[in-house]
Image: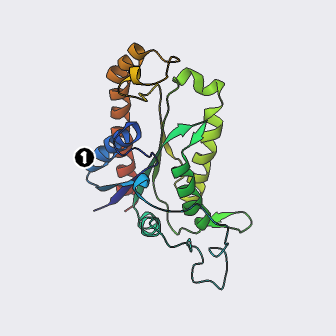
Amino acid sequence: MKKIYAVNGSPRNNFNTAKVLQSALDGAASAGAETELIQLGNLKYSPCRSCMLCKRKDSNSAGRCAIQDDLTPILDKLRAADGIIMGSPVYFGNVSGYFRSFMERFYFSLLRYSDPPASQLERPIPTGMIYTMNIPQSAMQEMHYYEELGRINDFSAMLLKCGKVETLYVCDTFQFTDYSLYEADLFDPAHKAAMRETLFPQDCAKAFELGRKIAAKCLKAE
């Protein structure tokens, strides 16, 4: 059975990003894949330390991150995965700190400093990316989110050798279950509640189809 992992880059285990990722895994499972959700917020790990041991020809860690911490077994799982679906909330126009540190460790160890640059992987891993954010989709272009997040998609496509990254942008999300408890006059609680009732289920349905598509790619690669 094909194994597909989802990686939650949010510090919250059961909020927007986690719920959408679970929908994606449900879609993958419906297509016959075995699934697992990885919660980065539960792990203790560091960002890349630029030790360069993953690039050293004489190192036992060549092609792999040399740091030993909670992320080490996760990186081993992902290198052996049949498919990966990664998700992060967007903070200040980019992925979360949890996801950025994870990405540095995962991607830099896969990067070969060849000419042209290439991946250490010997096979493609079908990949999906899900980004959740508070702003409406109409603001994404104005704030250059497509360009900023698109660079992550490009790195993912090259280093995981998947050709095309299946991408979902989940916009206008809930930040609080009760807006009256927070300093948040910028937002209309009624609008946010309406989006939670109407738009968010649609995004979860899109995530389900994304998961099915990743699973189909895994099966096609057999």
Image side of residue 13 versus residue 91, left or right: left
Residue 166, percent across and down?
Answer: 48, 43
Residue 55, percent across and down?
Answer: 66, 74
Which residue is drawn at the image coordinates 58% and 73% (left, top)? 63
Query: In terms of depth relative to the viewer, which is nearer, 161 or 189?
Result: 189
Is label 1 in a helix, a strand or a loop? helix
Amino acid under label 1? Answer: Ser
Which residue is drawn at the image coordinates 34% and 34% (left, top)? 204
Residue 106, percent across and down?
Answer: 54, 62
Residue 28, percent across and down?
Answer: 31, 48
Q: Residue furthest bottom?
A: 58
Residue 2 versus residue 25 in the image, above or below: below
Query: In terms of depth relative to the viewer, which is nearer, 73 or 182?
Result: 182
Quadrant containing the N terminus is bottom left
Which residue is drawn at the image coordinates 35% and 27% (left, top)? 177
Q: Residue furthest right?
A: 115
Image side of residue 186 versus residue 40, left or right: right
Residue 101 versus residue 75 in the image, above or below: above
Image side of residue 206 versus residue 165, left or right: left
Residue 75 in view: yes
Residue 119 in view: no
Query: In terms of depth relative to the viewer, which is nearer, 200 or 44?
Result: 44
Q: Which residue is mark 1?
A: 30
How many numbered discs, if any? 1
Question: For residue 95, which quarter of the picture?
Answer: top right
Residue 128 versus residue 135 in the image, above or below: below
Question: For residue 142, which quarter of the picture?
Answer: top right
The coloring applied to the image is: rainbow
Q: Residues within 10 Å of mark 1 (few under 14, many from 20)?
A: some
Quadrant containing the C terminus is bottom left
